[in-house]
Every structure is written in C-alpha cells, then in structure tokens.
Amino acid sequence: MPLPGNGRPHYARDAEIHLKRADPILARIIGEVGPLRMTRRPERFRALARAIIFQQLAGAAATAIYNRFVKQIGGGRFPTPAQVLAASDDAMRAAGISRGKALYLRDLAAHVRDGTLNFHRFARMDDEEIIVDLTRVKGIGRWTAEMFLMFNLQRPDVMPGGDLGLRNALAKAYAMEKPPKPKELVEFAERWRPYRTAAAWYLWQSLRVITPDTPPAPAARPRQRTARATKSAPRRKRKSIRRK
C-alpha cells in the first residue's frame, strides 16, 4: 500500500493509538517525538545492494564508494543486475568495492537475474518467509532483511532484536541496568504487537538513532568570526591609588 503524501505509513494512526494504550512509557515517548513518519523507500535491488556497500563503513566513506560505484559500474545511474555481473574485478576495485563485497553484489545480482529472488512474490509472503528468502543471498543477514521489511516494504510488525541502538534505547526508556539481549528484547516487544515496527521507530527516535530513512545531515558550515570578535578588547586603565 502506498504512503500518503505526508510520509506517514498506512498503519500510522492505528499504531499510535494501540501503542499509547498498551504501554504508558511508549505513550510518553510518542508524545515527545510526535506523529509516526517513516519515509517509504520503494527500491528493491538498489536498496539491498546499497546495504551491502555500506556494511562496516562510516557514513562519509560509504557514501563516496557508493557514488563511485554508481558512476563507474552504472554510468551515472544505479547499475542493473546485468551491469553488476558484467563488471570486471578491476572496475569494482576502482569504485572502492572490496573483493568480498564484489562477491556479495554479484551473488545478489545473480539471484535477481535468475529469478531465484523475485521481489514480486513478496506481497504474498509473510515476514519470516521474506527474511529466509533474502538471507540466502551472500552478504545479507537478518538485520538487513529486517530493515528492508520495515523501510522498503512498510511491514508494520517487525522487531529487529539484534539492533544495538534499539536495545540501548529500550534500556534507557525503561531504566534497565543494561541493554537487553536480542532474545529478551523480542520477548519484551510482544506487548507492542501488531505494531512492533512503529514501537522500534519511536525508540530509535527517542535516542535520535540514525535509521535507513534518515536524510543525510547537511555539512556543517564553518563559523565566521565577526569583526567585533576579531578585535581585541580595549584594556582598562588601572586607577592609581594614592596613599595618604
């Protein structure tokens, strides 16, 4: 189902009502954060390839490699599976793609080309079936599949128990001594069904954790010193004290 123009998932209103009733602490977070807004990312092959490229890299470095990949392998547009499979090892290295990631990208491209990974089938599959289908591809783990479900397929009831940012957010919101283990988080999240995706998003927002739909932050502009600030302050004359 497509998103409304304001960036709200189709289940947003129902999720907010349910979570407020089910959990007073989450109700407070919802009140502080505001309406649920998750930018829908309709990409399929592109989203998964981008996730592979960004693995274990800082944002700026990953973005630079991603842009070179698009330019050199796709000629300025995001490469098709056929273009990825046709790209030489030298071309991949020139784009900054490591040998391991090149292998993962080719495996993804081969699955899509051969139809063994068919995105059109996803509408008829439940969340766990999609996770199993995606994780057959080299380089795609459960967390990547869960992010794909949440932000690309807009599935309302996904709980990424292994996400460290989410575990830290839960520990802070519920005054836990330490972040819960992945299994403990999944068990705790049962109270939020069938809108665990929305609950996860609100917890991320409570710590301002960067999520796949977070727009890149603008580059910080250097602060200019004003003319007044650059001038040295005039020295005060010390009054001489006469002894009587």
Image (cartoon, rainbow, N blue to C red):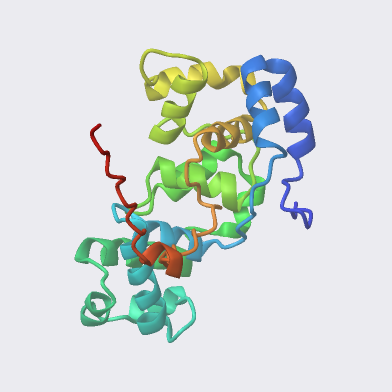
With respect to residue 182, does 65 lie above or below? below
Residue 94 locus on image (x, y percent): 24, 79
Position of residue 64 in the picture relative to residue 153 (left or right): left
Position of residue 148 in the picture relative to residue 105 (left or right): right
With respect to residue 10, does 169 lie above or below? above
Closer-to-camera residue (200/135): 200
Residue 168 locus on image (x, y percent): 42, 27
Closer-to-camera residue (206/95): 206
Regarding residue 218, the answer to whether it shows in the image is yes
**Quadrant occupied by the C terminus:** top left
Question: Which quadrant holds residue 33?
Answer: top right
Q: Residue at x 72, y 52 (%)?
A: 7
With respect to residue 223, does 75 lie above or below? below
Question: Which quadrant holds residue 158?
Answer: top right
Q: Residue at x 67, y 15 (%)?
A: 24
Regarding residue 115, the answer to whether it shows in the image is no
Position of residue 20 in the picture relative to residue 58 (left or right): right
